[in-house]
Image (cartoon, rainbow, N blue to C red):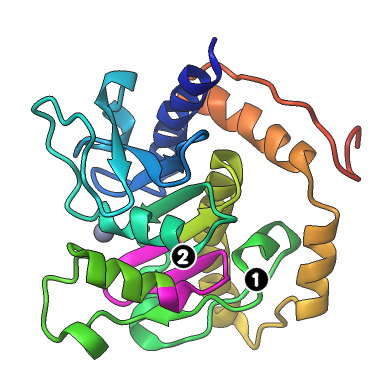
Amino acid sequence: MPALASLLDELVTANRILAREGVVDAFGHVSVRHPDRTDRYFLSRARAPELIEAGDLMEFTLDGTAIDPAGRAPYAERFIHGAVYAARPDVHSVVHHHSPAVIPFGVTGAPLSPIMHMCAGIGARVPTWDSRTSFGDTNLLVTTEEMGRHLAAALGGRPAILMRGHGAVVAGASIREAVFNAIYLQLNASLQMKAQALGDVTFLSEGEVAAVLKTRGAYTFERAWERWCRRAGRPYDARPMDGPLAGR
Ligand SMILES: [Zn+2]
């Protein structure tokens, strides 16, 4: 399969996996930066992720303009994706979701931080962006470039950010990394709620987070991706398993 077609097939798979794992429901989306044009990205037309086919994928410029809409309606919140790609040359995939597990943290200001090694990819502390602080009373959706840029600035160089009363954004260097971190962000939020019901939580230190990420290579993402493909009923397109943990 040609490289671009393979990448778009992987984007379809990412949609199906995020739906299967409960990170997205009828809403939420995942995009990938164009491999040959850093000023463009691919994102589905407005449709529930578990239904998405290759023909639903649309190409956009970073300001959210569709290259060839062909009658397809885009997501109102596509501005999240373009703004993150514009601000972060290291990011090649973006997930936006409304996972119920993360919502309590965004509305209370309770710190959300990794409590287990698999969740280190969410960063030592996940910040929260509140649309109301700069944009007043809105419907909470990120529907303009200006809002997208404001959100991307709050994300900074981090892998994830919560959105008050709305959801979260997770960024990755690849589709597999972004999906991995989105799934483990959801898991960490769920586990942290349970742990804090029992007592004070000992979070991973910044040094522990750095140590986990230092040993994380393609092997980690591939091992998870293969399983998630099976669960989502999608073919697994294997990639080389490099990194310090390969073979373990
Ligand atoms: Zn949203």
Query: Which amino acid lies under the numbered mark 1 shown in the image of this protein?
Result: Pro
Q: Name above or below for residue 196 compared with residue 160.
A: below
Task: Please give the count of numbered marks on the rendered protein.
Answer: 2
**Disc 1 packing (10 Å; few <14; some 14–19; many ≥20):** many
Residue 37: mark in rendering: none
Q: Is residue 84 visible?
A: yes
Report the image quarter containing ligand 1: bottom left
Span of residues in magenta: 153-169
Going from N to C along the chain, the mark reached first, 2 or 1, is 2
Q: Residue at x 32, y 31 (%)?
A: 50
Label 2 to label 1: alpha-carbon separation: 25 Å
**Disc 2 packing (10 Å; few <14; some 14–19; many ≥20):** some
User: Dot 1 corresponds to which residue?
Assistant: 114
In the rendered view of the protein, which quadrant contains the C terminus? top right
Query: Which amino acid lies under the numbered mark 2 shown in the image of this protein?
Result: Ala
Side of 67 relative to 39 (left or right) = left
Residue 187 covered by magenta stretch:
no
- Tag 2's secondary structure? helix
Quarter of the rendering containing residue 200: bottom right
Q: Residue at x 33, y 70 (%)?
A: 149
The percent coordinates of residue 61 (x first, y second) are 31, 45
User: Dot 2 corresponds to which residue?
Assistant: 87
Side of 156 relative to 119 (left or right) = left
Q: Name above or below for residue 140 compared with residue 81.
A: below
The percent coordinates of residue 184 (x first, y second) are 58, 55
Side of 152 relative to 156 (left or right) = left
The percent coordinates of residue 113 (x first, y second) are 60, 76
